Image: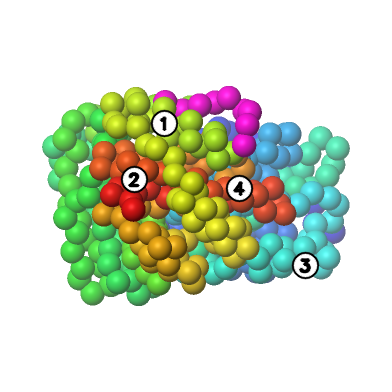
Amino acid sequence: MFAPLVLALAPVTAWASDFHSPFVLAPASLAPTEAAFVARCGPVDGALTQVARRAAEERAHGTPMDSARLGHELRLRGAPYVWPRLWMITGHGLGDAPSLDALAPWRASLHPLGERRCGAGIAQDANGLEVVAVVMVDVLADLAPLPTRVRAGQWLTVDATLRRTAEDARVFVAGANGIPRSVPTSRRGSHVIARFAPDRPGRFTVQVMLDGDRGPRPVLEALVFAEVEPADEAPGVPGEDTQPFGPADQALERNVAGLRHAFALPPLVRDVRLDALARAHAAAMAKAQTAAHDLGAGDPIERLRDAGLTARDAGENVASARTALEAHRALYASPSHRANLLRPEFRRVGFGVERDARGMLWVAELFASGLR
């Protein structure tokens, strides 16, 4: 029987020189158990493999990796993938058929959105138990190299190759002042091209959005550091509420209120009509196990119309996370979602939260102006 790797990985502190995808990995570099799990999951990716190994090691040392850490580990390695999923199993002889078969229900529960890529890692805990982690992403676009460290004022080109047909594509940049903006974007065949220059020293988040049959969706994210050294994400966001009490929808309401106050924006009024629509959509996402804006009942504008409501403008944020605070942090970290949170024209909001059988929260935030 194959002896599992006892991984003693040094902390990853050096950021990659650029963001790009995919990450080629020679199959021979995988341990046999890793190769067996990847074969049941999808094409192997080098960055996902390294993160899976890190997740297995941390679980073996008693520190399970949450979604925020999972995303951060990908960013450290220059991987622009979004919505990574993590599956883990602990036991003896995990390379056998029953252990491999245990992966199938999880994989089948996740609705495929694009080209699936996977990584698997194995470690051993202090009691001799094996730990296997599998990280999977659905890839709708790949990114040409984008440098991590740049000068303020340096022009950069975002070049994304689409892996799925899209009606429209946009690139958002959230700069050092925290305010996201859309940058001019063009299409050249399967390529999405945008150029921007960091206007000041600091950290910039770059996001590629595609409009498809399920509505707008972030498909790539990268970090650019202008004249500052890369550093870990701040532990919180402006105005967040870290009090672990009360229903999740009320926690999100406090988070959004605090965020808008921190940016001196008009407060949002919670609306029971928007609450009902948001709750219905959160339940639909939990059932489909997919975060999307259109799951068959229409986009936010269509759902408002079907409920007998009209709005001058509307926007929606959707997410899946373990806690309300984790969802809020993830939405703030995404430039396009942050744009909804900070849009001054919005006056009303509804929150919907559904917890699935695995304990994950599915969140919908519905914003509107001129609602009647």
Measure the alpha-carbon separation of dots 3 and 1: 45 Å
Q: Nearer the viewer, mark 2 or mark 3?
A: 2
For the residues carrying marks 1 and 2, which lies nearer the camera in this image? 1
Real-space Cα separation, disc 2 to disc 4, in angstroms: 20 Å
Depth check, mark 1 against mark 4: the one in front is: 1
Tag 2–tag 4 contact (CB < 8 Å)? no
Residue 97, quarter of picture: bottom right
Amino acid type at circle 4 is Leu
**Mark carried by residue 101:** 3
User: Distance between the Cα atoms at labels 4 and 3?
Assistant: 26 Å
What is the distance, in whole Å, between disc 1 and disc 2 at their CAs?
13 Å
- Which numbered mark, 4 or 3, is in the foreground of this view? 4
Q: What residue would you read off at disc 2?
A: 340
Question: Considering the numbered disc 3 on the image, is that residue within a helix, a strand or a loop?
Answer: helix
Provide the residue span drawn in magenta.
Answer: 239-247
Q: Position of residue 258 (x, y in %)?
A: 41, 27
Q: Earlier in the sequence, mark 2 or mark 3?
A: 3
Discs 4, 3 touching: Cβ within 8 Å: no
Element class at badge 4: strand
Q: Is residue 344 magenta?
A: no
Given contact means CB atoms under 8 Å apart, are the residues at marks 2 and 3 in contact? no
Instruction: Provide residue 168's location: percent of width, then percent of height.
Output: 27, 67
Mark 1 surroundings within 10 Å by alpha-carbon count, few (fewer than 14), some (14 through 19), many (20 or more): many
Say which element carries label 1. Answer: helix
Q: Earlier in the sequence, mark 1 or mark 4?
A: 1
The tag on residue 257 is: 1
Label 4 sits on residue: 361
Looking at the rendered structure, the secondary structure element under dot 2 is: helix
